[in-house]
């Protein structure tokens, strides 16, 4: 008997998920099988540890439910009945159907729908843009996330990375604002622990007493959607009490007088009424924030998830310039540092291929676009879904399902699994997972360039998104050079390798090391705006935004690179507080008195891993956290099943009675697969598709509901 001793190969990779941490992976491979994925101990953020979601990442690759071959629908729409076909047959069918649609309705009757299921330069947010721009489809505005914050950020400080989260170790006062860091940005937490050990105070501003709030020195419970009022109230106190860094303001900002006039409208008493925060706490927060330097604000994405979210982020982003916090290492604020990376979005998205006048359809309006609730000429006759799962993740999901049921809609989905969205497809196309593909990752929570090298062969007939779009281009007869470039050549062109930030970084070195830090200053030294140097048109922090003059805009990255036809909603020169649409004073409040927020789950990454039994055990079933007083009024006991509903739809969940939420507020997590829930629906059946005041972002937390025991 011969004994086969297998050798373990270690290949360097990077996490594919839409998460600020973008961890450095080590793939452990035996006999061409991925046996384990661990965190790189040398990476300064990853520090050898992966989050709960990625604990079973190797097994995820071998999940028996993976989509391995192209499939064609053989049962009624949504029945989940498919049979295997060849790639050639799938591509031929797509070509025939699209050619007919283009002949009859024009190419804009085709709508792509992609988001951030994967986060690579080749396979991520922009993976399909070049293809669809070339095809002449409608431009999809992909604003599920960060587009409101980023628009606000760029209006105020320009495309700068701002504070490095690693520099938080040097901060003395840290505000984690609208972020559940222990769930969603776990690898930033050690820097906060380090700062705390040196005496820093940590404040969490969140309507919910989260795991992160419980670890903080001070949890400030704010009513959802009122952050703009709080930031303006802090300014009011800072100005009234002479805590402004007048020298910094004078040298490095514009619009102080206008901002001061706005802040004067927000005395602490008024802010207390709006936010539900006691006056004394507003005073203390403002004073401590201004006088304890370096002070840092880690902005979460949740602040944008309300109608006034864009202006709230503008107001928050003004704070460190008012107090001069930017002067210090560990001072300032961070939204996402993606702007330091020299991506060539012109190459990745090919906006030059968009025909002038092409219409833009926002992806959050998918339900309205498919059902005709939003009049479109031509109507959408084909939908191509990749990197996204709108039936779970987009608002007003019931309307989306109604649209996907349309017999005359030709739907194609590229997926890892047959999700709640993919099950409505006419054609399914199988995609690779991260250990099976090459990519240079987009990162939005640290300053390292990350390369993912394939470690194992793709199973079945799975292809990376980049190859999927090459195949589609081939089927449609496109002969541009773009479609003949290798993955590696695409990576070379997706970056400006000559940019100053890339000094010393090459693809060759990355192949060896896996990751390298951008040349933008070390965490212990970096103070990017100590002397202004903002990336705005004026070069200053724009309290009064010059971009406001042109009205609302969406950063082109979210619009497939397109800069044309920006919506013209005028924006105030200085940030204001814009109230929620669905609030206690609104018409719906008499029928739907409870405000429901739906942040991220601990054990899932949006919907990903929510079909893995190990992760389902970690996360538990769909819960709704309700205050005992609200539960008592409705005879709801702890652990009982409830129906949460409003005019848009409903879902069922198990009630958890807890004072982690205030009366009038409920919390549930987004991410559970609707089809795996007892009601066949999830939280987005209740959310509205209204947009935030900036960047067309979603307003998932502006959601009034009622709840009843089932
Ligand atoms: N475990 C895990 N991590 C993730 C993800 C995941 O699905 N799971 N998703 C990733 C993605 S795509 C993103 S965008 C990030 C998002 O991560 P975060 O920025 O943390 O955003 P959320 O989880 O949506 O919400 C964070 C907190 O904001 C609170 N909140 C809700 N509304 C408001 C408000 O109006 N004001 C304030 N101050 N707080 C509010 C919520 O109660 C919640 O505790 O996480 C990433 N990381
Ligand atoms: N109520 C509510 N809704 C929300 C939010 C909220 O806080 N509350 N958050 C919003 C936010 S911040 C975000 S970012 C969105 C996220 O929404 P999505 O980006 O749609 O979420 P994911 O579940 O991460 O990914 C979608 C799908 O991409 C697939 N996928 C992964 N990798 C690949 C690949 O390489 N190729 C292909 N073709 N497919 C792949 C996955 O299998 C998954 O089904 O949800 C938004 N929706
Ligand atoms: Mo997100």
Image (cartoon, rainbow, N blue to C red):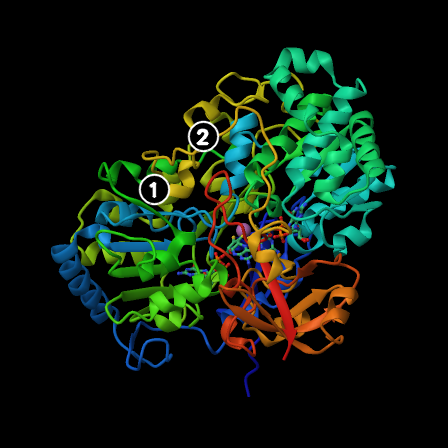
Q: Position of residue 536 (x, y in %)?
A: 51, 22
**Mark 1 burial class by Cα count in 10 Å: few <14, some 14-19, many 20+:** many
Residue, disc 1: 349
Q: Position of residue 330 (x, y in %)?
A: 73, 31
Q: Is residue 573 left or right of residue 194?
A: left
Which is nearer the N-term, disc 2 or disc 1?
Answer: 1
The one nearer the camera, 152 or 12, is 152
Q: Position of residue 346 (x, y in %)?
A: 34, 36
**Residue 326 in view:** no
Determine the residue located farthest toward the left in the rendered image.
103
Residue, disc 2: 570
Q: Dot 1 lies on which element?
A: helix
* Residue at 58 percent of width and 49 percent of height: 22
Calculate the distance from the C-alpha at mark 2 to the C-alpha at mark 1.
27 Å
Q: Quadrant for residue 157, please give it.
A: top right
Q: How many marks?
A: 2
* Residue at 64 percent of width and 11 percent of height: 251
The quadrant of the rendering that contains the N terminus is bottom right
The one nearer the camera, 281 or 331, is 281
Q: Dot 2 lies on which element?
A: loop
């Amino acid at each position: 008997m011969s004994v086969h001793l297998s050798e373990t190969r270690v290949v360097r990779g990077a996490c594919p998920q839409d998460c600020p941490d973008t961890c450095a992976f080590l793939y452990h491979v035996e006999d061409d099988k991925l046996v384990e994925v661990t965190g790189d101990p040398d990476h300064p953020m990853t520090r050898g540890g992966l989050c709960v979601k990625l604990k079973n990442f190797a097994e995820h690759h071998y999940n028996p439910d993976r989509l391995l071959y192209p499939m064609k629908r053989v049962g009624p729409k949504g029945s989940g009945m498919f049979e295997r076909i060849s790639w050639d047959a799938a591509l031929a069918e797509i070509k025939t159907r699209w050619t007919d649609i283009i002949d009859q309705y024009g190419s804009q009757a085709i709508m792509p729908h992609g988001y951030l299921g994967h986060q690579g330069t080749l396979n991520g947010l922009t993976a399909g843009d070049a293809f669809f721009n070339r095809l002449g489809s409608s431009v999809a505005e992909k604003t599920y996330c960060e587009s409101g914050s980023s628009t606000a950020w760029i209006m105020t400080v320009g495309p700068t990375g701002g504070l490095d989260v690693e520099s938080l170790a040097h901060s003395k006062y840290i505000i984690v604002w609208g972020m559940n860091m222990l769930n969603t940005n776990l690898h930033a937490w050690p820097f906060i622990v380090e700062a705390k050990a040196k005496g820093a105070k940590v404040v969490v501003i969140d309507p919910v007493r989260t795991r992160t709030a419980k670890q903080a020195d001070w949890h400030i419970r704010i009513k959802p959607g009122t952050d703009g009022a709080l930031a303006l109230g802090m300014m009011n106190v800072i100005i009234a009490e002479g805590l402004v860094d007048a020298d910094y303001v004078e040298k490095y900002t514009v619009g102080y007088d206008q901002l001061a006039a706005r802040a004067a409208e927000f005395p602490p008493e008024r802010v207390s009424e709006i936010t539900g925060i006691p006056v004394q706490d507003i005073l203390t927060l403002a004073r401590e924030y201004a006088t304890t330097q370096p002070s840092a604000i880690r902005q979460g994405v949740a602040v944008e998830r309300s109608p006034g979210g864009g202006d709230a982020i503008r107001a928050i982003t003004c704070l460190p310039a008012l107090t001069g916090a930017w002067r210090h290492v560990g001072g300032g604020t961070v939204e996402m540092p993606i702007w330091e990376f020299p991506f060539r979005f012109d190459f990745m998205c090919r906006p030059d291929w968009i025909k002038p006048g092409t219409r833009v359809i926002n992806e959050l309006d998918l339900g309205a676009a498919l059902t005709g609730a939003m009049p479109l000429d031509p109507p959408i006759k084909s939908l191509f879904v990749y990197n996204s799962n709108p039936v779970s993740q987009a608002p007003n999901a019931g309307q989306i399902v109604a649209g996907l049921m349309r017999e005359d809609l030709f739907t194609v989905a590229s997926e890892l699994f047959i999700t709640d969205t993919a099950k409505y497809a006419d054609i399914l196309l199988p995609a690779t997972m991260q250990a099976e593909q090459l990519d240079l990752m987009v990162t939005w929570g640290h300053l390292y360039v990350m390369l993912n090298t394939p470690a194992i062969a793709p199973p079945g007939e799975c292809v990376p998104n980049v190859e999927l779009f090459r195949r589609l281009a081939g089927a449609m007869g496109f002969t541009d050079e773009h479609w003949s470039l290798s993955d590696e050549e695409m990576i070379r062109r997706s970056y400006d390798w000559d940019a100053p930030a890339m000094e010393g970084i090459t693809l060759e070195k990355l192949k060896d090391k896996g990751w390298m830090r951008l040349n933008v200053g070390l965490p212990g030294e970096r103070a990017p705006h100590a002397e202004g140097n903002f990336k705005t048109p004026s070069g200053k922090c724009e309290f009064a935004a010059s971009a406001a003059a042109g009205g609302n805009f969406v950063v082109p990255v979210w619009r497939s690179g397109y800069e044309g036809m920006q919506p013209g909603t005028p924006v105030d020169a200085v940030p204001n507080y814009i109230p929620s649409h669905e609030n206690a004073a609104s018409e719906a409040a008499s029928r739907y008195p409870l405000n429901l927020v739906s942040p991220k789950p601990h054990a899932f990454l949006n919907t990903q891993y929510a079909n893995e039994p190990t992760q389902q055990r970690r996360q538990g079933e769909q819960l709704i956290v309700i205050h005992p007083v609200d539960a008592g009024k409705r005879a709801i006991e702890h652990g009982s099943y409830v129906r949460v509903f409003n005019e848009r739809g409903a879902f069922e969940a198990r009630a958890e009675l807890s004072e982690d939420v205030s009366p009038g507020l409920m919390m549930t997590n987004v991410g559970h697969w609707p089809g795996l829930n007892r009601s066949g629906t999830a939280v987005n059946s209740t959310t509205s598709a209204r947009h935030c005041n900036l960047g067309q972002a979603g307003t998932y937390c502006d959601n009034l509901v009622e709840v009843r025991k089932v």
